[in-house]
Amino acid sequence: MDDIVNSVERLHGSLQLPAVVIIEPLTLTRTCILSILKKELVGFDLIDMATTDSLDCASARDVRLVALSIADKSIIDPSVEYDLMLVADCHPNASITLWSNRDDEATALEAMNLGVRGFFPTSLPIELAIAGLRLVLAGGVYRPLPIVGPHAMSRLEQPCPRGLPAPQLANGLAKAVADKGAVDFTPREQQVLAELELGLPNKLIAAKLKLSENTVKMHIQHIMRKCAARNRTEAVLRWSGRLPVRSRDSDASESSAP
């Protein structure tokens, strides 16, 4: 009897967690992805399925992200367009990411133009893919740069809402550049910020930049102070233009106001 009660309690607890849906037709690939993400995306319930036909099983869940595998298909393939439309209809508030065997810039841009929040070539190293998923879950947009490889860098871009007109998009990007220039970072702080954009932990940032973890922590503290940010995620959001950059003086005046 206790086992039944415990099972029900665990199920109920799982249903309260925000969910990430993984859609991958290959069983072995899907199982491997799940095994990795269960360790990396703590606090999220992972729901896996072979096709979008099973999306109804997650209709009552708070789905935050849907990762759809399109293998070798083109973005304009009718089946891909259908799957994207179905995901958007079933989970309008979820961010959509694509896993593709293609790693060309044209495919990535086509995906972004359709409102996809993350484009992940299967040639990406696993640590970058995980960092990219975390960025999308945090509200960012992830796609690799044109050259993809073991030492490739990726970037966090201004979110591109579906159907946003080109002039508005251009203005948004211009504002992001202006906001980035509003804070004077040292060259090393800029390097650390670039790694923070990838969602990398301090240990990996230290290894990539050949610094100690304590030094990385010091740079992050300086970055947060310059951005008037409460945490590293907020610092990246302010630096990328999705939150306004506030000066320390304005922040101090707000805190001293009655």
Image (spheres, grey):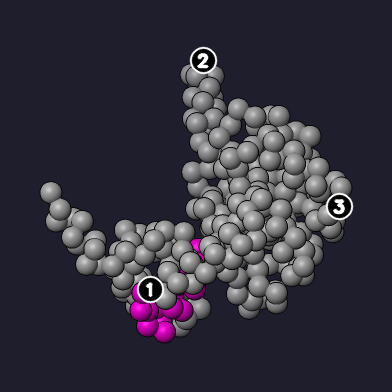
Q: Which residues are magenta?
A: 182-200
Name the residue that disc number 3 marks.
77
Residue that appears at 70% across and 57% down: 113
Disc on the earlier residue, 3 or 2: 2
Precedes in sequence: disc 1 or disc 2: 2
Viewed as shown, does residue 70 lie left or right of 11? right
Residue, far top: 1
Instruction: Give the image quarter of residue 192.
Output: bottom left
Q: Residues within 10 Å of mark 1 (few under 14, many from 20)?
A: some
Residue under the image location 74 percent in, 45 percent down? 84
Find disc 1 in the rendering and name its residue. 182
Residue denoted by label 2: 1
Three-letter code for the amino acid on which mark 2 is drawn: Met
Left or right, 240 with reference to 59 = left
The 10 Å Cα crowd at callout 3, few under 14, some 14 to 19, many 20 or more, is few
Secondary structure of residue under mark 3: loop
Residue 195: in magenta span: yes
Residue depicted at x 36% and y 74% = 183
User: For numbered disc 1, what is the local secondary structure?
Assistant: loop
Mark 3 vs mark 2: give the one in front: 3
Residue 167, compared with residue 91, is above or below; it is below
Q: Amino acid at mark 1?
A: Ala
Q: Check whether the beta carbons of the residues at disc 1 and disc 2 lie within 8 A of each other.
A: no
